[in-house]
Image (cartoon, helix red, strand yellow):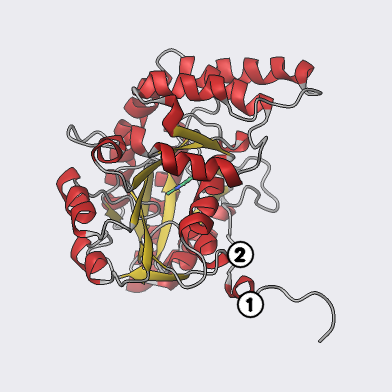
């Protein structure tokens, strides 16, 4: 062989498949494939983005100081223990390289977020997927999978794509059962959508321990996936390590300004949560009435279970024919399922009506 050869683990990575946004032949598309939030970006964030245009010749503040201050104020956290990333995806990658790497084991649950597997493998670590129970992370199985080589355990809470949630006591039991040298990463990308009164997105656990890191993002409830803003909260030592390796000017001036403005948008989160709670329930009820099993969800999406991969594929094709894009789940080893984002009231109604028609046709076909 000639030419540059990649490190061998790179070839083991299956490229991430993002939610699609186009359907050939459809002039109006309903995109419910990437959990982007029902209301678009906050108006104040859009204004801040436009204003930043005049400053684009300037390098951004490499430490995202104003943004970290605003995040700290909003969530009652010490800004010195926060680091921002170009989406939490960037931070996941650094975490894997800092604490994982060759010889390390990284644990995740079977249907956990794919970026843990991609970034963990990239670092040279072995990524181990631990079986779940009822599409929910199984604390006992995770603890049983720990070896002396285990360095990191990633858990999304709520989890994408299953929507499942670990109760605070279960998360605390997981932390308590892990050796002190294992970093527990609690990825709370969907934290704002959780309505359980005793929910802790992870900040409480970070405060009580010195080996837990919380990840958050502006991509979901704040509707800013295109701006790439995420953040981590951990010990000062952890934040210092991530600061050494992240892109020095990772967040653009526009991203920083828009995120600060998003936090200041009056009532934004409350509106998003109220809408999501109502329409997630309505959409779930409509799908179940149509004969589709829906897994309980704490996020801004539903995992619809069509029982067979053939039927899920058929439903996906049927929706696409109507310009509706949802997310096939074959890559998550859930080929009988489709993940559907809770969109606007109109979008929820469209997808529910379409699936009702699809299921009626399926039933007629089975009878005939
Ligand atoms: C969407 C998502 C993220 C983050 O995304 P960024 O856009 O990179 O901030 C992280 N974890 C989970 C579980 C997600 O669903």
Residue bearing the label numbered 1 = 8
Mark 1 Cα within 10 Å, few/some/many (few <14, many 20+)? few
Residue bearing the label numbered 2 = 15
Seen at 47% across and 43% down, the residue is 35
Seen at 35% across and 32% down, the residue is 192
Q: CA distance from mark 1 to mark 2?
A: 15 Å
Mark 2 Cα within 10 Å, few/some/many (few <14, many 20+)? few
Seen at 71% across and 73% down, the residue is 6
Whether residue 342 can be seen here: no
Whether residue 28 can be seen here: yes
In front here: 96 or 43? 96
Please give left or right for residue 359 compared with residue 264 in the image. Answer: left
Question: Mark 1 or 2, which is nearer the eye?
Answer: 1
Q: Residue furthest right?
A: 2
The picture places residue 24, in percent across and down from the top left corner, at: 69, 53
Please give left or right for residue 214 compared with residue 90 in the image. Answer: left
Earlier residue among tags 1 and 2: 1
Q: Residue furthest bottom?
A: 1
Q: Where's the N terminus, which quadrant?
A: bottom right
The picture places residue 263, in percent across and down from the top left corner, at: 47, 20
120 over 267 or under it: above or below: below
């Amino acid at each position: 062989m000639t030419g540059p050869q990649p490190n061998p683990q790179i070839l083991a990575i299956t490229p991430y498949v993002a939610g699609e946004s186009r359907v050939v032949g459809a002039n109006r598309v309903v995109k419910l494939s990437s959990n982007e939030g029902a209301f678009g970006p906050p108006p104040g964030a859009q204004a801040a983005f436009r204003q930043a245009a005049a400053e684009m010749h300037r390098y951004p503040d490499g430490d995202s100081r104003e943004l970290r201050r605003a995040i700290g104020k909003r969530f009652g956290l010490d800004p010195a223990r926060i680091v921002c990333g170009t989406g939490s995806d960037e931070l996941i990658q650094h975490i894997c390289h800092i604490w994982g790497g060759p010889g390390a084991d990284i644990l995740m649950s079977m249907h956990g977020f794919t970026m843990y597997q991609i970034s963990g493998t990239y670092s040279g670590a072995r990524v181990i997927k631990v079986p779940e129970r009822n599409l929910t992370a199984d604390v006992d199985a995770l603890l049983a999978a720990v070896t002396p080589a285990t360095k990191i355990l990633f858990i999304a809470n709520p989890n994408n794509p299953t929507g499942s949630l670990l109760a605070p006591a279960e998360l605390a039991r997981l932390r308590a059962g892990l050796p002190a040298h294992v970093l527990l990463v609690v990825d709370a990308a969907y934290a704002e959508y959780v309505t359980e009164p005793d929910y802790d997105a992870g900040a409480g656990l970070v405060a009580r321990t010195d080996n837990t890191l919380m990840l958050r993002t502006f991509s979901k409830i704040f509707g800013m996936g295109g701006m790439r803003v995420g953040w981590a909260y951990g010990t000062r030592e952890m934040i210092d390590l991530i600061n050494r390796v992240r892109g020095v000017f990772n967040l653009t001036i526009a991203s920083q300004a828009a995120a600060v403005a998003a936090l200041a948008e009056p009532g934004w989160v409350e509106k998003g949560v109220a809408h999501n709670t109502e329409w997630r329930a309505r959409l779930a009820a409509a799908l179940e009435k149509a004969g589709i099993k829906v897994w309980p969800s704490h996020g801004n999406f539903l995992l619809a279970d069509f029982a067979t991969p053939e039927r899920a594929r058929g439903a996906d094709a049927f929706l696409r024919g109507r310009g509706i894009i949802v997310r096939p789940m074959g890559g998550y080893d859930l080929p009988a399922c489709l993940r559907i984002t809770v969109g606007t009231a109109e979008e929820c109604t469209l997808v529910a009506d379409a699936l009702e028609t699809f299921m009626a046709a399926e039933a007629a076909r089975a009878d005939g």
